[in-house]
Image (tube, rainbow, N blue to C red):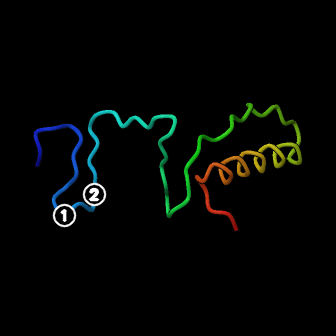
Amino acid sequence: MSNTKNYKKQGGDKWVVNGVLEVTESGLLLLNNKPLTRSQGQAESTASTISDLKEDFNSLLEKLKHAGLMETE
């Protein structure tokens, strides 16, 4: 246990963040050695057909994959 909000656990294999983790403009978050980026926004769907809804959904999936938040096939 630590008396600070943010600390590295004994052994160094885990960070605990109970405060704010600020990543500056030049900072980088990696997941499996790949950078995580902010996903592009997705407009609310106005689809009125299953086909249009499928297009909207696939667009969302592509944005999540591009941001590194979802595995690519």
Kind of residue at badge 2:
Lys
Q: Quadrant of residue 5?
A: top left
Residue 71: give its label.
Answer: none
Write the residue at 51% across / 35% down: 25
User: In this view of the protein, which residue sits in the foreground, 57 or 59?
Assistant: 59
Q: Which residue is mark 1?
A: 11
Task: Tell me whether circle 2 and circle 1 mark residues in contact (CB < 8 Å).
Answer: yes
Q: CA distance from mark 2 to mark 1?
A: 8 Å
Percent position (x, y) of residue 4?
Answer: 16, 38
Percent position (x, y) of residue 8?
Answer: 22, 51
18 vs 55, left or right, is left
Percent position (x, y) of residue 51?
Answer: 89, 48
1 vs 66, left or right, is left
Label 1 element class: loop
Write the residue at 60% across / 53% down: 68
Residue 14: give its label.
Answer: 2
Percent position (x, y) of residue 18?
Answer: 26, 38
Which image quadrant: the C terminus?
bottom right
User: In this view of the protein, which residue sits in the foreground, 12 or 42?
Assistant: 12
User: In this view of the protein, which residue sits in the foreground, 22 or 26?
Assistant: 26
Q: Residues within 10 Å of mark 2 (few under 14, many from 20)?
A: few
Q: Quadrant of residue 6?
A: top left
Kind of residue at badge 1:
Gly
How many numbered badges does the structure rendering display? 2
User: In this view of the protein, which residue sits in the foreground, 63 or 55?
Assistant: 63
Write the residue at 84% across / 36% down: 47
Label 2 element class: loop
- Residue farthest to the front, as pictured: 26
